[in-house]
Image: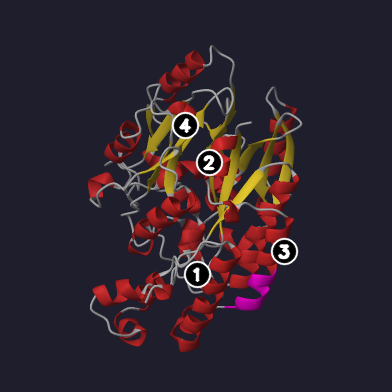
Amino acid sequence: MTLEYNFDGLVGPTHNYAGLSYGNLASMQNAGTQASPRQAALQSLEKMRKLMHLGVSQAVLPPHERPNIALLNALGYKSIEQAYKFDPRLVAAVFSAASMWVANSATVSPSCNTKDGRIHITPANLTYSLHRAQEAAFNQKIFTTIFSDEKLFAVHKPLPSYSDLADEGAANHSNFCSDYDVPGLEMYVYSRSRDSKQYTGRQTKLASNAVACTRFLRNSHLLVQQNPQLIDEGVFHNDVIAVVNKNVMLYHADAYVDWARHRAKIESFFNQDCYFIEISADQLSIADAVRTYLFNSQLVSLPQGGMALVVPMECKGDVVEPVLQSIRSGNNPVNLVEYVECRQSMQNGGGPACLRLRVVLNEDERQGCHQGVFLNEDLYNKLESWINKHYRETLDINDLLDPSLITEVHNALDELTKILQLGDIYPFQCV
């Protein structure tokens, strides 16, 4: 059986609100406020369990080692205090826990889509910002650790780190298919253009096309431009304005440039057997879409048939409720809406879909993966205990100067690698 697995990122022990993500309105608005690493990690873990109980296959990806002392030293600083005096945001960057949003970690094409019959994984270079760009090398390492069988998996190097090749991963990628084991039509959305005025688009057309071309897809791919006006309103990734599962797409009517032409190609691919759930500006403004992250929901297939839309709690009792009712009552496979609490992530600009990387696996591929990362009740209980043992209840920017925090992080990650049976993957373990 071929299933879609959600590989969710575990929130790291240094989860904080530094406002480093320029153009992400929630991140910018909550800069400097107090965060709760423990609550953030427990909320994301509970989301994973809720989906597991819905019958959705789940796995976990470990957080990155933070602070990234190697980056600090490469910038000429011998200590955290020295860097803090120059610019506190620099310290926040090397402590960033943004790797939790693994939708940006890579672009994944299922084996049925590729000519060599392997799953292709391209870690994103994330060159748009310093606090994310530092993730690329470790993401490649963790993917080659989990997906190590080269007969089944092709883990590419990230694209070269040039501005013109800025790649933000699966947050700008969708796979249309009739079923997970049937070759699909992949859509790559780019946002970099000269038309946005306040914020710069993060994904370039050149990068999107390069990622698509290097995996030798069976079917031609779609290159779609995001509406540049939306970038200035806080739509910094495609997954803030649209979500796709199989032959169902939920999106805002203002999301794309020249959408009618692209939609016609998708309809032709499916011979009209597909569902477009288009939400108009009259139903939901862009501002409300960004505030509630309706489109950053997870659209998942259920074992008993139909689909569930997993939405953040911010969609409850809001202007979104009538929209959700129209989706449930419409002519489409969505027959369930599930609410999840992920407020700690939302306040930093990431909803349910940001926290997961979708990987389609058949049984052979599932067995070819590292087995220690697949979620079950036993692993859930171990991770819950691990979080409660090692994570601070609160953390703010000034706490990053506490020297004991580094020791706490190392102790936590050292124990995590044993729980997930990953071996010594972190730099501090290899010294």
Q: Is residue 329 visible?
A: yes
Of labels 1 and 2, earlier in sequence is 1
For the point 59% across and 25% down, the residue is 179
For the point 64% across and 71% down, the residue is 387
- Image quarter where the C terminus lies is bottom left
Q: In the rendering, which numbered label is found on residue 381?
A: 3
Q: Nearer the viewer, mark 1 or mark 2?
A: 2
Q: What residue type is labelled 4?
A: Ser
- Circle 1 packing at 10 Å, graded few (<14), some (14-19), many (20+), is many
- Residue at mark 1: 17
Q: Position of residue 220 (x, y in %)?
A: 37, 22
Disc 4 from disc 3: Cα separation: 32 Å
Q: Main secondary structure of the magenta part?
A: helix
- Residue at mark 4: 111
Q: In the rendering, which numbered label is found on residue 236?
A: none
224 or 315: nearer the viewer? 224
Q: Where is residue 80 in the image (x, y as percent from the top left)?
A: 36, 83
**SS for tag 2?**
strand
Cβ atoms at labels 3 and 2 below 8 Å apart: no
In magenta stretch: residue 387? yes
Q: In this view, does 30 lie to the left or right of 134?
A: right
Q: In the rendering, which numbered label is found on residue 359?
A: 2
Q: Is residue 140 left or right of residue 393?
A: left
Q: Which of marks 4 and 2 is in front?
A: 4
Of labels 4 and 3, earlier in sequence is 4
**SS for tag 4?**
helix
Bounds of the magenta segment: 385-394
Q: Where is residue 1 in the image (x, y as percent from the top left)?
A: 64, 31
For the point 42% across and 22% down, the residue is 262
